[in-house]
Amino acid sequence: MLTATTCNCVFQIAWFWRFRSHQITMNGISYIGLARHLVDGDFKASLHGYWSPLTSWFIAAASVFSKNYTLLGRVVTISSFLLCLPLLYLLTLRFCRSRAAAALSVLWFSMARGIVAECVGSILADFVLTACVLLYFTLLLDTLRRSQSTCRLSLGAVHALAFLAKAIAMPWLAIATVLAVVVKNARVPRRLVASLLLAFLIPAAAWVGWGCALRSKYGVFTTGYQLRANLRVNWHRRQTHFARGDDLDYVDTPSLYDKYMVGETSWASLQAFSIRKAGLLPMIVDNEAKNLPDAVNRQ
C-alpha cells in the first residue's frame, strides 16, 4: 500500500502540474509578497494581521536557492502536503498500533484528488498547518501515555508552530491540551498545574511575541484579526489604514496594496474583487512578472 501511495502521489502531482502550475490566487500573492518583504530586510512590512507568518518564512528561507518565488511557494506547499503522509502514518500507527491501518490511512488520504490538486494549484498554509496538527496529536498520545516533562514541552513547541502556521490553531489545540492534561493528572492537583504550565510555556511565548510584533505595526496588541472577533484591532485598523471606514469599499483601490500586492483586506474581500472587479488585474500581472524571473521571456 505504501508503494501504491507513492506512485499515486507522483502521478497526481505530475498530472495536475500540467494544468494548474500556472495558476495563482490571492493567498499565494500575499504569502509571496510577505516573503519578499522579509528577503528585502523589511521585517515590519512582512508582518500581517491576517496572513500567519510561517509559510512566508519558509518561502523566504528557500529563496537562497531560487528567485522564482512562485515556484518556491509551490514547492513549499507540495512539500508540506508530502510531509503530511509520513506524519499521518506515524499518528495512525501510534493510535491503532497496526501497520496495515497506518498504510491504509495514508493511501486513502493520497486518493483525495481535490487535495492533491489544491496543493499543486495553490500556495496555502493549510498543509503546513495539517502537518503541524498531525505531529501535535502524535505527541499528544505520548503525553497521555507518559509523564515526562519533555513530552509536554515538545507538545507546546508544536502547538506554537501550528499557531504560526495559522492562528486558529491556538484556541483549538489549547482545548485539546487542557483536556489531555486534565485527564492525565486530575487526581494530583500540583502535577496538573505544573503540567499545564509546561504545556503552555512555549505557546504563550509565541502568542505574546507575535502579538507584540503586530503591535509595532498596528498600534494595538493583537494576535491577528482572522476571526473578526478581535473588534478592537479591526476598529483601529480601519482608523489607520482605511480612512473612510469600510474594507469592502476599497478592494479595488491600488493605494491599499504595497509594491508586492499585499493588502490589509480579508480573504473574503480579496476573493470578491478577484471575481467581480478587474481594476487590479494589471497590478497582479505586473506583480507576477516580478515573482517569475523568466516571465517576460516566456510571453
Image: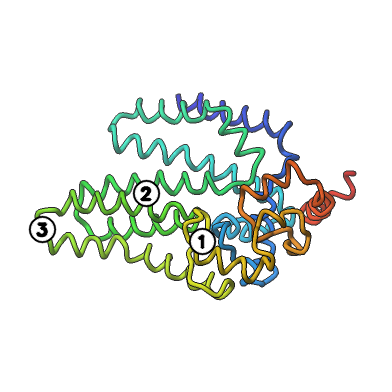
Dot 2 or dot 1: first in sequence order is 2
Q: Are marks 2 and 1 in contact (CB under 8 Å)?
A: no
What residue do we see at 30% from left, 29% from top?
98
Q: In whole angstroms, how far apart are the C-alphas of marks 2 and 1?
A: 22 Å
Q: Find residue 252 and report its horizontal and vertical position in percent.
A: 76, 54
Q: Find residue 179 and report its horizontal and vertical position in percent.
A: 25, 49
| Nearer the observer, 133 or 166 | 166
Quarter of the picture holding the C terminus: top right
Q: Which residue is mark 2?
A: 136
Q: Which residue is mark 1?
A: 224
Q: Find residue 292 and report its horizontal and vertical position in percent.
A: 79, 51
Dot 2 or dot 3: first in sequence order is 2
Name the secondary structure under disc 1: loop
Q: Nearer the viewer, mark 2 or mark 3?
A: 3
Above or below, 120 relative to 8: below
Q: Is residue 99 left or right of residue 116?
A: left
Quarter of the picture holding the N terminus: top left
Q: Amino acid at mark 1?
A: Gly
Name the secondary structure under disc 2: helix
Q: Are marks 1 and 3 in contact (CB under 8 Å)?
A: no
Q: Quadrant of residue 261?
A: bottom right
Q: Which residue is mark 3?
A: 188
Q: Amino acid at mark 2?
A: Tyr
Q: In whole angstroms, how far apart are the C-alphas of marks 1 and 3?
A: 36 Å
Q: Is residue 221 left or right of residue 75?
A: left
What residue do we see at 13% from left, 64% from top?
190
Using a 10 Å C-alpha cutoff, classify the residue at mark 1 as few (fewer than 14 neighbours), some (14 to 19) or many (20 or more).
many
